[in-house]
Image (cartoon, rainbow, N blue to C red):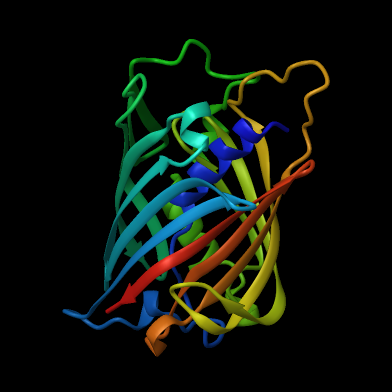
Amino acid sequence: MSKVSLVRSIAALCVLATPSIAQNGPYQSLLTSLSPGQSRSVDISLRARIGPLELARGSFKVSLSQDSYSGEATYRTSGIAASFNNDAGVATVKGTIDNGQLKPRSFVNQETNGKRRRITMAFGGRNVDVTAAPMWSSMGFPPATLAQKLDAVDPVTGLMELSLVTGRDAGRACGGAVKIFDGKRRYDIRTQYVGTENVSTPAYKGPATYCRGTYTEVAGFNQKKPGESREPIRLEIWLADVGKMGVSVPVRMTGSKGIYTAVLYADRAVVR
């Protein structure tokens, strides 16, 4: 895998690095315990690098109430990475919370550089309506099927679901598989709980939940070139309860493939 490909993946992870909620048992989480009128909000900013070289920056704001949620993420390549691949954009999602489950209703990703492609997705019934302007020249090899789209959520909801819903029986963040569709690409993120480790970032220093996982391509990706690796990206995620509010956020993440390892870390995190 090239540096440029890993940069693209880490830029996507800037959007995907969403907050999780600390679990307290099989059915206890913030998704089921908020009362009418109560809410929680998270505002984090993140940076990605390979060694001393900065690759990307991102930010994420999410708001949760008893029966709905919304989120806005920004991302852009930066530093030396921007000379190879100048990606930037804003992603937003709105959805409902039904019996502790996140259900996206609308998702928009607006690229602010390059082709300035706008992707919108509407979830409902037995279809996922997708529009993209301009359209892609190819829908990937193979393209995502309707069944694969229906079995997935948008990228922002996907990481929230990974943290909030899966692994609830074990009382852990992480611990399962989440299927994600971004309008073209379908991929799986699988994680498992490992333990607790101390972590140090500009936003947080102290004990954090440590998880390992993989990012695996399923459908809708560009056809691989001869000799190009198909191995999944290996992930490590550290989640911490910043501010002791009962809401864990990703304070550090790594993505590794081949000889490259990119590090994504929080340089600011506010929970209210």
Q: Quadrant of residue 231?
A: top right
The answer, for residue 27, to whether it is visible in the render is yes
Vertical placement of residue 166 versus 5, above or below? below
As drawn, the residue found furthest toward the top would be 137
Horizontal and vertical percent for residue 246? 42, 85
Left or right relative to 166: residue 99 = left
Residue at 35%, 41% (x, y): give it: 123
Horizontal and vertical percent for residue 193? 69, 73
Residue at 71%, 49% (x, y): give it: 256
> Which image quadrant: the N terminus?
top right
Q: How many marks?
A: 0
> Which image quadrant: the C terminus?
bottom left
Residue at 67%, 69% (x, y): give it: 211
The answer, for residue 165, to whether it is visible in the render is no
Left or right relative to 202: residue 252 = right
Left or right relative to 117: residue 220 = right
Q: Quadrant of residue 25?
A: bottom right
Horizontal and vertical percent for residue 241? 46, 82
Q: Quadrant of residue 110?
A: top left
Along the line of sight, the residue nearer the viewer: 100 or 223:
223
Horizontal and vertical percent for residue 36? 19, 80
Along the line of sight, the residue nearer the viewer: 93 or 200:
200
